[in-house]
Amino acid sequence: MNATCPAYLVPEIAPDAPANDPGAVSIRGTGLSIDELIRVARDHRQVVLSQESALHDRIQRSYAELQGAVARGETIYGVTTGFGGMANVLITPRESEELQDNMLWYHKAGAGGRLPGADVRAAMLLRANSHLRGASGLRPELIQRLLTFLNAGVTPHVPDLGSIGASGDLIPLTYITGSLIGHEAAYQVDFDGQSMDAREALRRLRLPHLRLEPKEALAMLNGTSVCTAIAAGCVHEARVLLEVAMHAHALMLQGLHATDLSFAAFIHDHKPHVGQVWVAKRMREMLQGSALIRSADGQRRNPAKGLVQDRYSLRCLPQYLGPIVDGIDRAAAQIEVEMNSATDNPLIDPDSHGIFYGGNFLAQYTGVAMDSLRYCLGLLAKHLDVQIAQLVAPEFNNGLPASLVGNSARRVNMGMKGLQISANSIAPLLCFMGNSLVDRYPTHAEQFNQNINSQAFGSANLARQSIDLLRQHVSISLLFGLQAVDLRSHAIAGHYDAGQLLSPALVPLYAALRKVTKTPASEARPWLWDDNERPMDGAVAAICADLASNGQIVQAGTTRAGRSLVEGAHASLDA
């Protein structure tokens, strides 16, 4: 490849040369990780094809094998027959291209709004990666066209309703495929921020309109790439939000003047679930050196008055969060297998000259993983909500003002009462959305051919909505933790600058929260002093936006010593 040639003008399926982008992601049909997918989908890193000659040879042989079978007049589903429940309709060779063309027409039937562009980009990468396994029988040019669009910043408009995840994501993938080949002007794309029809995008790229050959529509539309792309993004966000939520818990623990004895290794060595042990280890790291905690060093282990041990939401934190960590880890493993699978039908084996009919397009693993993930997100919100309730109640917060009022001398101050109500409105929604979808709604679709289905696309979209809700709840929880540690600092040291007393591991988060909310730390006042100082919704929005962009708060919570959840809890414990 000519190093000066734009990425979208490379020869079709040519072996990759060194990319212009040092962070480029190379794909080969196996080994693609969620983190790599996110780099392409959200950070717009270039994509290059592996240089392995055996990989490209297998793709070519798979294509040649299918073409030979068609030339011999063999009966092949979706090539010389109709689709699904109409597979008994025989298609003549001269009708075979019309059949593929028509598959795009009748599946352009989506509804609703538009999927986020990052999810569409992720789906395009997964479709290319799936075909690189060399079992789909399509031309290499279609694989390259997917990468061309990605590297040129061309993203098809894809509806967010329409897939049952049974014969794959037929309808969403229709919009991607129709855009790639310039099927008709009604397919719309985003080209570096500008909307236009797909044919205009091809003209700008100086690429030809393509006509699909036998099986190519089936190969492109049969597959779990869209729901799995959405799911991978949700797993990534869940990892980040869980890590930030744990930091919110660490703030709240210090605000409540809790003990760190509950996280002692001795306890968790005697119940060694991977997630539980990891959470306890992370909490020890996050609380070490705090002047706001009742340390288990023997000097301040038990308070002179009050409870000898903390309430369950504090004391059982590793036992509660541990299964959530394990659940996210399990979902990630399932999604990464799906990301690196051939998911269309039939599959072509050029070695045995076999054509195999099966159901890899059923996205059950993705659907079950997303049902499980949403359940875990609901549990996470429930736990944070309980901590908030403990913080605002003087009966339970170890001497802090009711509703975390800042200026107690001002009788009209109500503190964070309204913010608690806001959080409490979100947590039940997350718990409700944790209900399973995959087991509920069989549709017996398409002449009873798709008589079981995964509903993975719907489950993944619900997970995406749950992530958005959890981000709001975590943002509010961080504000409660921020106010609580300021008030606790005053109770212990006579000033409100918690940055001087917090555990060293939490100081970067404290500073980031102060910076994002534009409220410099002060010894004279806590984060919120008088209610009329500022509306709190602005602070919630600012924190939420920072979390969504992996900004200062996320960086403060995931770059210190001790491997974060973003890198994998199991890997951390194995190291």
Image (tube, grey):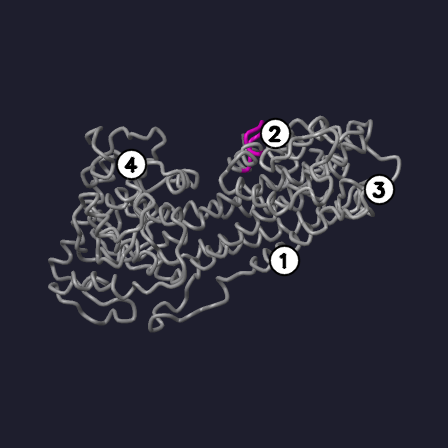
User: Circle 3 is placed at which residue position?
Assistant: 307
Residue at 22%, 28% (x, y): give it: 3
Q: Quadrant of the C terminus?
A: top right
* In contact (CB < 8 Å): disc 2 and disc 4: no
Task: Find the residue positioned furthest to the bottom.
Answer: 447
Given contact means CB atoms under 8 Å apart, are the residues at marks 3 and 1 in contact? no
Q: Residues within 10 Å of mark 3 (few under 14, many from 20)?
A: few
Q: Earlier in the sequence, mark 1 or mark 2?
A: 1
Which image quarter: residue 253? top right
Query: Residue shown at 22%/58% (left/top)?
Result: 184
Residue 564 part of the magenta segment: yes
Identify which residue is drawn at 58% across, 27% down.
561
Q: Does residue 372 appear left or right of residue 198 in this picture?
A: right
Tag shown at residue 310: none
Kindly report which numbered mark, 1 or 4, lies closer to the viewer in this rendering.
1
Q: Looking at the image, tell me whether mark 3 or mark 1 is earlier in sequence order.
A: 3
- Tell me the number on the disc at residue 508: 2
Task: Mark 2 vs mark 3: give the one in front.
Answer: 2
Q: Which residue is mark 1?
A: 428
Residue underneath mark 4: 48
Left or right, 155 with respect to 393, comes to: left
- Gap in angstroms between the C-alphas marked 1 and 2: 31 Å
Task: Examine the image and state in which quarter residue 274 appears.
Answer: top right
Q: Please, what is the three-letter code of the amino acid marked with disc 1?
A: Pro
Q: Which residues are magenta?
A: 557-565
Assess whether residue 24 is covered by the magenta stretch.
Answer: no
